[in-house]
Amino acid sequence: MATIKPFKGVRPPKQWVEQVESRPYDVLDSEEARAEAGQNEKSLYHIIKPEINFEPGTSEYDPKVYESAVEQFKLFQQNGWLVQDTKENYYLYAQTMNGKTQYGLVVGAYVDDYLNGVIKKHELTRRDKEEDRMKHVRINNANIEPVFFAYPDNEGLNSLIMRYAATQPEYDFIAPVDGFRHQLWVISDEADIVYITQAFAAMPNLYIADGHHRSAAAALVGAEKAKQNPHHTGQEEYNYFMAVCFQASQLTILDYNRVVKDLNGMTTEQFLQALEADFVVACKGEADYHPAHLHEFSLYLDGMWYSLVAKEGTFNDADPIGVLDVDISSRLILDKLLGITDLRSDKRIDFVGGLRGLGELRRRVDSGEMRMALALYPVTMQQIMDIADSGKIMPPKATWFEPKLRSGLVIHKLDD
């Protein structure tokens, strides 16, 4: 069963929140962060992308960069741009995109739940990326940015959330880059805190939706601290890390599409003919064409869109991996026809999040940069949970969650 706790959040006073908050560290590069921060000394990028505090070209892995993050975190608190709450709270975080709102509870997730599989994963992590985030957590002694969890729908929790959502939020703003609305409420009522804690205690599992490397880093640092403390009791704050937990049915997963540089030596006609072994291929013309259902793909090639419907027998709906369109397209198109076997390292392929739309796929092909584009039907949260429950791992580049969590609304210290 899932163990969570409230915590004393470190967060900006209301008047500073829009200057402090930022996009997550891993959705933009150093120069983009430098440009977004501009002359704003209160931008969280000075803590989560601290290489911007140095000359352009400074490595984000330079020891002085990590040290700068610590200096900035201290400075933000000294200047009152970040202030710690005096009591332990939960927090309610709402994101509104295209008229749809999803509500997440900001909690302290239990390190042991991550280590023993109560918190379930669906992606592999890379040790180098884990270590980078571990250094950031260690040196700041805090979870500066949250991880993104899902939990099975819960009617009681939903009623509590809706009750808070009907009140005045602590923060309410439109983010400048994504254009989405972000709101935050403080849940300080003791009865509500007990109710939330007990509701999660009845859940067999939580699921990582996004942020596998941050989850691993946060949990591993907590475990390190436990081993290093000869007086460890299990009650210390480092036994928990910050997560925003959303009801699974509320989450929006967008398509995560592919663009490829060449047809592996084939002409357009040869490639389309080769596809017919495993797909029903139909030309849809020049207008953008979205896949309409599971196991249908949209191919953009030579200025035309094609529908590709996987034939019976090419997939296994009873297999949580075999049912996925990312698996079908990888096996039958990228690997079999194009010779692309490693999506993580092959330079002939790139990936485009669905928020950019089919127009971005067209642009990259029409520019001559890429030869073809493949649009996929989005993965569902239920598919992700089924895979996590089965103990299997999603294929690479399978999910694209929007909207992204904003960073800097709440921070979790590991020592208080």
Image: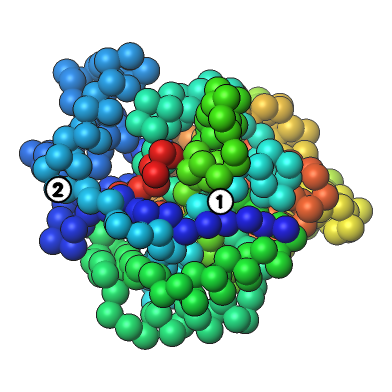
- Quadrant in the picture for the N terminus: bottom right
Classify 122 as above or below 156.
above
* Residue 168, label in figure: none
Q: Position of residue 17 (x, y in %)?
A: 20, 57
Which SS class for mark 1?
A: strand
Type of amino acid at the residue the image marks with label 1:
Ala
Left or right of 217, for residue 295: right
Q: Quadrant of residue 349?
A: top right
Of 355 and 235, the residue lying toward us: 235
Q: What scheme was used to colour the molecule?
A: rainbow
Q: Is residue 257 visible?
A: no
- Quadrant in the picture for the C terminus: top left
Of 400 and 326, the residue lying toward us: 400
Q: What residue is pinned by disc 1?
A: 109
Left or right of 19, for residue 195: right
Q: What residue appears at the point 27 percent right and 15 percent down from the top-left corner?
A: 64
Mark 2: give few (<14), some (14-19) or many (20+) Cα within 10 Å: some
Classify 393 as above or below 93.
above
Of 229 and 276, the residue lying toward us: 229
Left or right of 244, for residue 392: right
Q: Quadrant of residue 292?
A: bottom right
Name the residue furthest left.
39
Label 2 – label 1 distance at C-alpha: 27 Å
Q: Quadrant of residue 39?
A: top left
Type of amino acid at the residue the image marks with label 2:
Gly
Q: Position of residue 242 (x, y in %)?
A: 47, 49
Q: Is residue 227 visible?
A: yes
Mark 1: give few (<14), some (14-19) or many (20+) Cα within 10 Å: many
Q: What residue appears at the point 43 percent right and 27 percent down from the top-left corner?
A: 138
Q: What residue is pinned by disc 2?
A: 80
